């Protein structure tokens, strides 16, 4: 029964992940945190970190991680298949129709109309990640946060990382490794 739940959950995520991995994060969060409670908020934050650091799509990495945690290696395989199957089916169908009807203005209009929705999904995921990083929980906002709820070290590390990425156009991998080492040193000491 757990395998069917895993497959259906990640099939839904794969089916409605329009816009890629970052756009899928709210869907993944809904399934693994709220609907099934397979992960805690802290584990979800770790999931996001691991999924972004490992090679491959974020949604697929997340599905493999959750599948492994919930049901071991078979769960990882089933979650991964569930996540990629809708994309494979949809891409095959859409590629047929796209090449057949790509010059129609209505098709171009649909593609232009999807862009704002994708941007909003990515922004929502970014805000969720920022909130998890700064407040260690998702339910706190700046309006009702206490000073002790705010993780100032994370805020400083985010600001420094953004500054280095924007000002010096540094390689994101080097910045990730650097912040990982800094985090190990800082959080290892405190």
Image (cartoon, helix red, strand yellow):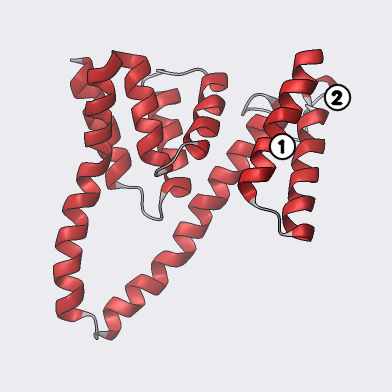
Give neighbour class at mark 1: few <14, some 14-19, many 20+ (Cα, 10 Å): few
Numbered mark located on residue 124 in the image: none
Q: Is residue 190 visible?
A: no
On the rendered structure, is 107 left or right of 49?
left
Q: CA distance from mark 1 to mark 2?
A: 27 Å
Residue 180 x %, y %:
68, 31
Q: Residue tagged by mark 1?
A: 178
| Secondary structure type for disc 2 | helix
Give neighbour class at mark 2: few <14, some 14-19, many 20+ (Cα, 10 Å): few
- Position of 167 relative to 145 (above/below): below
Please tell me in which quadrant of the rendered image residue 179 appears: top right
- Residue 177 versus residue 118: which sits nearer the camera? 177
On the rendered structure, is 142 left or right of 133?
right
- Position of 57 relative to 108 (above/below): above
Q: Residue tagged by mark 2?
A: 147
Q: Is residue 86 visible?
A: yes
Residue at the extreme right: 147
Please tell me in which quadrant of the rendered image residue 142 appears: top right
| Secondary structure type for disc 1 | helix
- Position of 106 relative to 138 (above/below): below
Q: Residue at x 39, y 25 (%)?
A: 65
Residue 173 x %, y %:
61, 45
Q: Residue at x 14, y 69 (%)?
A: 96
> Which tag is nearer the camera, tag 1 or tag 2?
1
């Amino acid at each position: 029964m757990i395998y069917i739940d895993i497959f259906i959950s990640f099939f839904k995520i794969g089916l409605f992940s329009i816009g890629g991995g970052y756009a899928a994060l709210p869907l993944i969060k809904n399934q693994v945190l709220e609907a099934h409670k397979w992960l805690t908020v802290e584990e979800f934050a770790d999931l996001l970190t691991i999924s972004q650091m490992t090679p491959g799509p974020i949604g697929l990495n997340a599905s493999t991680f959750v599948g492994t945690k919930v049901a071991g290696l078979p769960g990882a395989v089933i979650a991964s298949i569930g996540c990629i199957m809708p994309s494979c089916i949809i891409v095959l169908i859409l590629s047929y129709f796209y090449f057949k009807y790509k010059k129609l203005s209505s098709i171009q209009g649909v593609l232009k109309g999807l862009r704002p929705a994708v941007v909003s999904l990515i922004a929502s995921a970014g805000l969720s990640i920022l909130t998890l990083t700064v407040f260690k929980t998702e339910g706190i906002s700046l309006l009702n946060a206490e000073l002790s709820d705010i993780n100032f070290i994370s805020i400083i590390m985010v600001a420094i990382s953004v500054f280095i990425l924007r000002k010096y156009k540094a390689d994101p991998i080097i910045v990730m490794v650097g912040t990982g080492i800094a985090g190990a040193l800082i959080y290892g000491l405190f």
